[in-house]
Image (cartoon, rainbow, N blue to C red):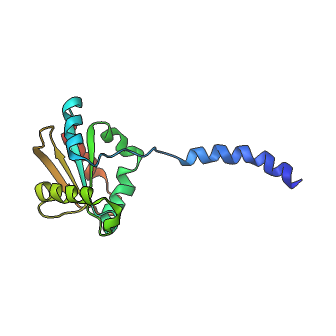
């Protein structure tokens, strides 16, 4: 009897699992030169996300509450996405990637603010930036910022 119940419930459980998945992972580029090339080719601005992925609670919350949701998909398609992480655990990145990220932070994030969203054009010229995240789920300011610079 138990086997019959399991067999009857199995298809239901499988179909329910599909409803849980709301979004595929958005691909962020980690190479600045590649981002510039794509921005020129696709005639888009670059959205840089400066983060401390393993130590910054507002960074983690912004990523979870907005950047990894379906609400962000509209904007993800309008920009070339560049992920710039400066983790405390240096084993999370290669030495070359960490060096590159620190160079980008020195150029585009002189104050060291995280989380920070910065928009640059296809030539790498800064257009605007937004620092911080309130962790109250207030993403309306972020969407308003992204609306301003999308192509």
Q: Position of residue 83 (x, y in %)?
A: 28, 51
Vertical position of residue 109 compared to residue 45: above or below: below
Residue 25 is left or right of residue 16, and the answer is: left
- Front one among 66 and 43: 43
The residue drawn where x is 13% and y is 64% is: 111
Q: Name the quadrant containing residue 37.
A: top left
**Residue 131 visible in the snapshot:** no
Q: Residue furthest front?
A: 95
**Image x and y of residue 127, in percent:** 12, 45
Of 34 and 79, the residue lying toward us: 34
Quarter of the image with the C terminus is top left
Q: Quadrant of residue 81?
A: top left
Count of numbered badges drawn on the protein: 0
Q: Is 120 situated above or below 38?
A: below
Residue depicted at 21% across the width and 59% down the height: 99
Q: Percent x, y for residue 41?
A: 22, 30
Q: Measuring from the top left, give residue 119's x and y in whole percent.
A: 18, 46
Q: Is residue 123 visible?
A: yes
Left or right: 130 with respect to 56? left
Q: Which residue shows up at 11% across the image and 39% down it?
A: 123
Q: What's the residue at 74%, 47% (across, down)?
A: 10
């Amino acid at each position: 009897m138990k086997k019959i119940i399991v067999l009857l419930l199995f298809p239901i459980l499988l179909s329910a699992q599909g409803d849980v998945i709301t979004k595929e992972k958005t691909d962020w580029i980690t190479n600045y030169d590649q981002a510039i090339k794509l921005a020129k080719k696709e005639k888009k601005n670059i959205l840089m996300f400066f983060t401390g992925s393993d130590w910054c609670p507002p960074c983690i919350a912004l990523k979870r509450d907005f950047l990894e949701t379906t609400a962000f998909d509209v904007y993800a398609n309008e920009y070339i996405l560049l992920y710039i992480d400066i983790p405390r655990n240096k084993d999370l990145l290669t030495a070359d990637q960490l060096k590159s990220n620190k160079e980008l932070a020195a150029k585009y994030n002189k104050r060291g603010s995280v989380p920070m969203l910065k928009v640059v054009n296809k030539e790498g010229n800064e257009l605007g930036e937004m620092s911080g995240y309130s962790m109250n789920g207030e993403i309306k300011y972020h969407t308003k910022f992204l609306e301003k610079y999308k192509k």
